[in-house]
Image (cartoon, helix red, strand yellow):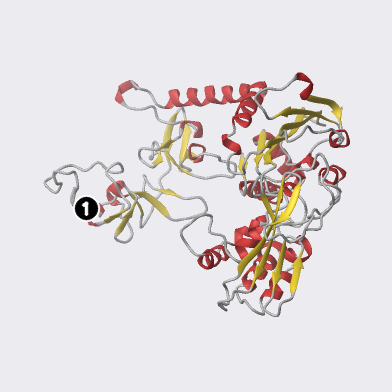
Amino acid sequence: IGHSMGNPIFRYFEAWIKYTMGEGPGKEWLRQNVNTYIAVGAPLLGAQFAVQAAVSGLTFGLPISEYDAREMGIGFSSYGMVLPVDPSRIDKRHRLLNNGYTKYPVPVSSVKYPNGSIEQYGASEDIWGASLWQHLQEFDSWSKYVELYIKNLYESDPVMDFMDSWKRPDVQNVYCVYGVNRKTPVSFQFSFPDNGYEHDWDTVMTIYEEGKRVYADDGSPVEVKEPQSHSKSGDGTVSYFSLSWCHTWMQERINITRVPQKAFYETDDLVELRDATIEDYVKLETTGDTGYNTFFEERHQEKGKFGVSSTAVWELDNVDHRAVIFEPVFLEQMSHQLHVQNKVVGRMEKQIEKTIDQMLATISIFPSRGEPAEPISDNDCYWDYSKVMCAFPNHCGYYYQFGDYHLGLSCRLHKNWRKEGGMMTAKHTEVAHDEECECEGYFCFYGLCKFKKPCQSSFSAPGLTDQWGRCQQAVNFKDLQMIGLDKTIIDFEDDGSCQADGTCVMGKG
């Protein structure tokens, strides 16, 4: 499940899988390992808030000034992932839903310069084309950072093309869920500050879409096409133009169900279109101020071994961007959808049974001869959360491999252990005993430290060669200064150093 900016993060992950494994193998890996993707409030064509954060600062309700918020925000180069961008291709369905527009209906920003001139800036040609940031640099050196981010981090990114509009993710089932008909900003006008501070731009005017209306908060006229009966606004944060791009992920022929958003309604108010198109949908009439939850869904047979794929778009009336995941309609429908996917449920049950069987085979409440069974394969190794390490440290260690999606999968037999004649034998390698382990430096971080050399109880983090382990395993444990440690990490023994309130002098107990 991706919410808001989590969706471009997932998109980058998907692109990275294909980039590192190759297009074909990457698609197959995604199909085998990701059954269902749920995009909630996805800014598929960006969000105008990202421009405001980069130019005048966006506090998100934090007790800081917009100046400080801008300085902080510019340091987060990831906001480029949600800068507004026009569609890279024209899609008939998206155009019909957005009143014929193939680009953002209004310029995503405008700037009132000190000489009194006002310049308007579009999404792709000016925000990503960098003309906005270049024009601002005459008065504001910080804008240079944004231009560099776009050129050095996004335009030159080898994994994906950020200007290319997102195609349907290569997973079996996709759900795109968002709220509609909320008051949503679609454009900001910025002005050089009266106080003359170089980096302190002001937001002096905002253009909103709300339902079928588009208006400026200062009363300025906004030139847009006459709204249609099906016209909608965004979810309060992301515009409908951006949210509705996921309609392009569906097949041409779809099923449409429109339900009035009110406590009581007549059967005639419920609309069900089967084997329909978006052209059929935009012809529907709406009644008064009634809001509707609309469900667009389709299923089709995939070529090859992956069977049936499904795609759905759910538009929930008057639901805010941050409230979708708590909306009863969303929770009820999603619960139903997950339960009817018998293959998914069956696969989960089999995986759970397999995991339980492995655990029971490895960990016995009443082990024979008083000791746990020794692991004889990688499947017998698991992560011991109480000790922050792999269980059976003499046999198992942390060895991350691509595709491991939880810590336990990365626990594998040491390479210096092999099975011979039904029992484990060790190859002789230079490994220090626990009593020879020594922490490097003078600090213990949250119960862990970096060892000077490998020990039987040490482990290495993914991509690193350093050996880490529990501070208690080190011979110099008593000399370490504890950082970020509480009594739940290490059980202190009261040797006279602990007070009546439970506090202890670090390094003695």
Residue 97's spot in the image, x, y percent? Answer: 82, 43
Image point (70%, 46%), residue name: 234
Q: How many marks?
A: 1
**In which quadrant of the rendered view does residue 371 lie?**
top left
Task: Depth check: give the residue in front, 86 or 482.
Answer: 86
Examine the rendered structure and indicate whether residue 302 appears above or below residue 323.
above
Residue 430's spot in the image, x, y percent? Answer: 39, 51
**In which quadrant of the rendered view does residue 502 lie?**
top left
Task: Depth check: give the residue in front, 216 or 433.
Answer: 216
- Per the image, label 1 sits on a secondary structure element best described as loop
Image point (84%, 34%), residue name: 281
Instruction: For residue 203, say whether it is visible.
Output: yes
**In which quadrant of the rendered view does residue 81 lie?**
bottom right
Residue 486's spot in the image, x, y percent? Answer: 29, 46
**Kind of residue at badge 1:** Met
**Which quarter of the rendering shows the N terminus?**
top right
For disc 1, the marked residue is 506
436 left or right of 182? Answer: left
Examine the rendered structure and indicate whether residue 301 appears above or below residue 282.
above
Residue furthest to the left: 496
32 left or right of 380? Answer: right
Task: Depth check: give the residue in front, 89 or 412.
Answer: 89
Residue 439's spot in the image, x, y percent? Answer: 32, 56
